[in-house]
Amino acid sequence: MFRLLLRIYSSCGELMNALENTYVISHRSQADIISVLSHLGRVRALLPVQMSPLEEEVMRKSLWALVNNRIFFQHPDLIRVLRVNENVMDVMINTLGKRAQTQSSGQAPAAASSPASPCAPEATSADKDTSHEMVVSCCRFLCYFCRTSRQNQKAMFDHLDFLLENSNILLSRPSLRGSTPLDVAYSSLMENSELALALREHNLEKIAAYMSRCGLQSNLELVDRGYPDVGWDPVEGERYLDFLRFCVWVNGETVEENANLVIRLLIRRPECLGPALRGEGPGLLDAIREAVRMSERIAAERLQQQKQQNPINMNEHGGEKSKNQLFGMG
């Protein structure tokens, strides 16, 4: 009874709160709205369950269908009002939590299993880990979401701490640029001076901590492909440098507060730049010269390999050129 009386007196307040979450749209976009709501319903239906690979595929297709819908870019405020970004963040949080739990639980059976059992490798190969595909789909959606409006950037900036804590995921794959948590992090503040000034030291300190590890380890994938070991991980290190660049250089101007903060963090962790600080001073110049020589040597080796693979084509072109010269002289 008391609740009914309270609603009678607070009806105007409830209407005002409802109007804040109300969005008016033209009847011409009715089909697009129906499509958005149907795919959003699938996403929300799969949130509380432990998704199987088939359900993860449905989730990825639904997210991509939401991005391809005209409502996504024409009405970015509607996507934010529907809290689609919050649902996608929940999906990514659940996926990363499931991945961490699987990795922690998989280490114990691996240590306990005997190496003589032939069924162990078959069992591990049968369980395919598709968590990275789900993370890529969520991050791609959130990157597009941040590009639609500054208000959407602000909505994602509230999750910056979580994104930076998981910013080292999937960075070793250059083909996934624009589809990692680090990409979502700097998409949430890219070309936005207000949000760039809202960065604090503990935010950038996480990037400096991850970047310092690049100066202490090598990229095994590059070493396996025959590239020389430079004592630094250029793939992940470049991505972290890009993030710091977006924090300092905003809208064609330098944010001095962030620049001073980045310099202080690099001074505290000199291993961030790896081989650039070797020696007493000219280490950076030596690193640049060494990188130039390395790229020239790699280009020369590739050119020589191409010549060895196609000697017949080179001879044919040479013969045609000599015939043309003879015809010209005649």
Image: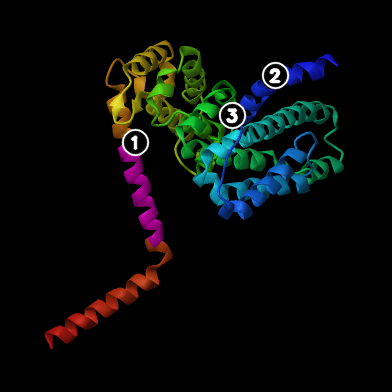
Query: x, y percentage for residue 269?
Result: 44, 14
Q: State the CA–CA distance, disc 1 to disc 2.
A: 69 Å
Q: Residue at x 41, y 57 (%)?
A: 305
* Residue 81 included in the magenta stretch of the image: no
Say if mark 2 contacts mark 3, CB within 8 Å.
Answer: no
Q: Is residue 167 above or below residue 79?
A: above
Which secondary structure, mark 3?
A: helix
Q: Which residue is mark 1?
A: 291
Disc sitting over residue 10 in the figure: 2
Q: Nearer the viewer, residue 286 or 30?
A: 30
> Mark 3: few, some, or many residues within 10 Å (few <14, many ≥20)?
few
Mark 1: amino acid: Ala
Residue 133 higher or lower than 285, as above or below: below
Q: Neighbour class for label 1 at 10 Å: few (<14), some, many (≥20)?
A: few
- Quadrant containing the C terminus is bottom left
Q: In the rendered image, is residue 46 in sight?
A: no
